[in-house]
Image: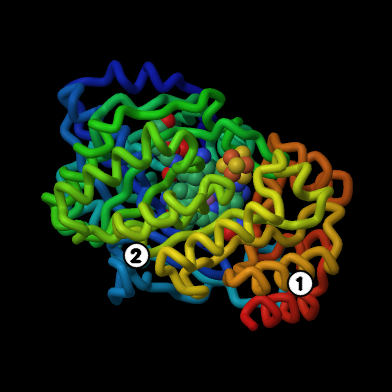
Amino acid sequence: MQKTKKKDIEEMFSLSGKKILGINPPVHDFSFFDLWSKPVGLLYLLEKMKHNNNDIALLDCIHEGAIAQKTFGREKIYSEEIEKPAVYSGIKRRYHRFGLSKDSIVEKLLAIEKPEIIFLTSVMTYWYGGVKETIDLVHQTLKDVPVVLGGVYARLCPEHASTLGADYIITDNWQPDVPYPAMDLYEKIPYGVTMTSFGCPMSCEYCASRILWPKYHRRFIAEVLSEIDYQKRLGAVDFAFYDDALLIDKEKYAYPLVEELTRRYDGTLRLHTPNGLHVREIDSECAEILKKSGFVTIRLSLESIDPDIVKTSCGKVARNEYATAINNLLKAGYSTNDCETYILLGLPEQSIESVKDTIKFVRDCGGKPKLAEFSPIPGTSSFAKALKKTPNLATEPLLQNNSVYSSWISGDISPKVLQELKDLARG
Ligand code: B12
Ligand code: SF4
């Protein structure tokens, strides 16, 4: 296998007149749900490359593997059971490959005009199995076509990502400076995605936002509006905001944006925030604006009421602030089921009692608890703590998988207790 070379993203921008194929690889995991997942980083990049006079195409192995429609534009993705990688051998859960089958990928690669370069993206660090499989398939099928690997996994685990056989790896970031992602590369889009900002002004101990986006950047409202208009023209009705911090400075950004969306679309858009909102920002005016402007799916980031964990979360929400926010949302017309609240589970040194207390607290306030299992992410302080117990986390990203980290890898919570906590959260 030839050695992977590191390149700067600027070198990619100098490409012109090339045929570029962007690929979103299949996912290997215990479970996968389309929570409005689109490879938006890759799509911004392809749009940029189009502006630089390249000929661009897309193979999205997740979207093209859709077999059924779910609510709000989401899709059920084809999956097949595959053998577990050796590090997961002791885990009594089935492992799957989600997305287009290998044969279909090869067929598609051969059916299109031969690209001169492949841009391969990556998201979760523990999804590298699908990345490796894609690199191998491209090399077998298209022989001499170079593969450039970028994305979240490549940025967070550059050394590991350099061992998969890609020709080039890009580990630096670029703040998209094109008006929208190249969503027109899809024949029909099931939903739109947008971001009003890149990064987050806070820096919680378990989160990689600051590593991925060292500078928090807000886009111009006009740019976000044009991004939404463009995807509306392509047929989207549902829109997911990918922001880490949508409601920060809400009077200056989120409010004018959604007011203009209501004026333009008369409340016909359905808006979703799968990534979690900053609870402290939800005063009564904010709750009413969210409701009036068509936010259907709201997810609230509480994480925990345990003071020690609140500290690791930059003290982003206090108990009384959460209670007030839920009260405001319920008064604005949302139901308890609408107020799904993320509770982090499996952090180093987190007690099971504190998770139970947080579940009870959320329910008592009128919210709906939703457990979010901890994924130790390279470069964060929580990762450094987790490493003391599980040194192999540093060299094997599969061990960072949130679905199995706390219950099988760190052993902090037994699978039985995890199930009990899940049942408790479900109510
Ligand atoms: C949106 C988002 C989601 C969405 C969907 C993401 C998707 N596309 O599938 C949802 C809400 C579903 C989600 C869920 C989860 N997420 Co998430 N998510 C994000 C978030 C906020 C943004 C990712 C994104 O799209 N960014 C926007 C684009 C523009 O950036 P980008 O993809 O990085 O692309 C840039 C570069 O990487 C580059 N690039 C990208 N591709 C390519 C390709 C080439 C060739 C090149 C040259 C460059 C390049 O160009 C872009 C511009 O610079 C990140 C945090 C963050 N701030 O990045 C977390 C993040 C990726 N998620 C994370 C986590 C922990 C989760 C959850 C496990 C949370 C939980 N406990 O439940 C779940 C897991 C989902 C699952 N099924 O396993 C972690 C990563 C964990 C890990 N070990 O990898 C992150 C980093 C957040 C964190 N806590 O630090 N997530
Ligand atoms: S507030 Fe959310 S996005 Fe920001 S650093 Fe904390 S966990 Fe990450």
Q: Residues within 10 Å of mark 1 (few under 14, many from 20)?
A: few
367 in relation to 106, above or below: below
In this orientation, which residue lies closer to the viewer: 228 or 32?
228
Relative image position of residue 198 (x, y in whole percent): 45, 33
Label 2 SS: loop
What quarter of the picture does the C terminus occupy?
Answer: bottom right
Q: Is residue 146 left or right of residue 359?
A: left
Q: In this view, does 155 lie to the left or right of 383?
A: left
Residue sticking out furthest to the left: 233
Residue 427, numbered label = none
Relative image position of residue 41 (x, y in whole percent): 38, 39
Amino acid marked by disc 2: Leu
134 in relation to 27, above or below: above
- Residue at label 1? 90
| Residue at 21% across, 20% down | 16
Who comes first in sequence, dot 2 or dot 1?
1
Task: Tell me, yes or no, if residue 151 can be seen here.
Answer: no
Q: Is residue 160 left or right of residue 21?
A: right
| Residue at 23% across, 57% down | 108
Residue 157 is drawn in which quadrant? Answer: top right
Residue 100, numbered label = 2
| Residue at 24% across, 62% down | 190
Label 1 SS: loop
**Mark-to-mark CA distance, 2 and 1:** 28 Å
In this orientation, which residue lies closer to the viewer: 228 or 93?
228
Relative image position of residue 206 (x, y in whole percent): 70, 44
Q: In which quarter of the image is ligand 2?
A: top right
Q: Is residue 229 left or right of residue 301?
A: left
Residue 366 is drawn in which quadrant? Answer: bottom right
Total numbered labels placed on residues in the image: 2
Amino acid marked by disc 1: Gly
Task: Tell me, yes or no, if residue 324 can be seen here.
Answer: yes
